[in-house]
Amino acid sequence: MANRVVLCGVDTSKLPKLKSAELEKLMKKVKEGDELARNEFIVANLRLVLSIVQRFTSAGNKSDDMFQVGCVGLLKAIDNFDISLGLKFSTYAVPMIAGEIRRYLRDNNSIRISRSLRDVAYRALQVKEMFINTENREPSIDEISSILNIPASQISYSLDAISDVISLNEPVFNDGSDSLMVLDQISDSENSTDIYIEKLAIKDALVKLNNREKQIVTLRYFIGKTQMEVSEEVGISQAQVSRLEKNALEIIRKNIT
């Protein structure tokens, strides 16, 4: 029961496992127009669809939806498969099923992501899956970058782009009485309470400056001009600017401490 997965009402643990020879015989019957053989062949390949869906589980979409889309890809693969080519059906079907799922994800994502960026992300996920299977560990971004010959920054950015979007109100911990949400773990260095109070204090302190001091502080610290530039604009010497600035800062310092 540990491996039991139900998708679209289908208990995948009970799906049949047919050998390659059996699948080949069924496919010949399918191409001859045998509808019973077609239905049996479809069911026999639902495990293949499931394995491909699992590659896209980090894309933030419901597995049921992707499984249905994958089944559409499976049907297209069955209809277009040419037995005269001598290929295994799975070799032909995998890219077609995966392509159908990629199109679905691209067209139904609330956040629009470029096709090229999404393709890089899915190639990276495929490399990651193969790497885990061969090396028994997850690859680093640099290792994926080396295999795909794509800059590590682009790999990282593309994987971030398809990652799940989480609500700020999503609970991350609950002790039985109160919930800790994502929002509670985010700090804002620009708009914290301390910064807000400090801004109010500075605003009050500026009121205590005379017009010339306010002008110099504004030009120096809000516009970013040098003392020489302020000197030329205000029409006084740089030494006077320096003295007035120093006096203004001392007044501000006394009012916010």
Image: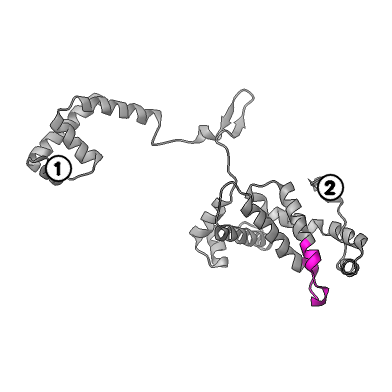
Question: Is 77 a magenta residue?
Answer: yes
Task: Determine whether the residue tagged by mark 1 lies in a helix, strand or loop.
Answer: helix
Of discs 1 and 2, which sits in the foreground?
1
Residue 107 place in picture, x, y as percent: 63, 53
Residue 255 place in picture, x, y as percent: 23, 24
Instruction: Pick whichever of labels 1 and 2 is earlier in the sequence.
Output: 2
Q: Is residue 73 above or below residue 241?
A: below
- Amino acid type indicated by mark 1: Val
Between 223 and 55, the one nearer to me in the picture? 223
Give the number of marks: 2
Q: Which residues are magenta?
A: 76-90
Q: Residues within 10 Å of mark 2 (few under 14, many from 20)?
A: few
Q: Quadrant of the C terminus?
A: top left
Task: Determine whether the residue tagged by mark 2 lies in a helix, strand or loop.
Answer: strand
Residue 218 place in picture, x, y as percent: 21, 36
Q: Which mark is residue 11?
A: 2
Q: Which quarter of the figure has residue 167? A: top right
- Amino acid type indicated by mark 2: Asp
Judged left or right of residue 250, residue 160 is: right
Q: Is residue 37 visible?
A: yes
Q: Quadrant of the N terminus?
A: top right
Marks 1 and 2, how far apart at CA: 76 Å
Q: Which quarter of the figure has residue 45? A: bottom right
Q: Residue at x 25, y 39 (%)?
A: 222
Q: Which residue is mark 1?
A: 230
Q: Residues within 10 Å of mark 1 (few under 14, many from 20)?
A: many
Residue 51 place in picture, x, y as percent: 75, 56
The secondary structure making up most of the magenta span is helix
Q: Is residue 112 above or below residue 211?
A: below
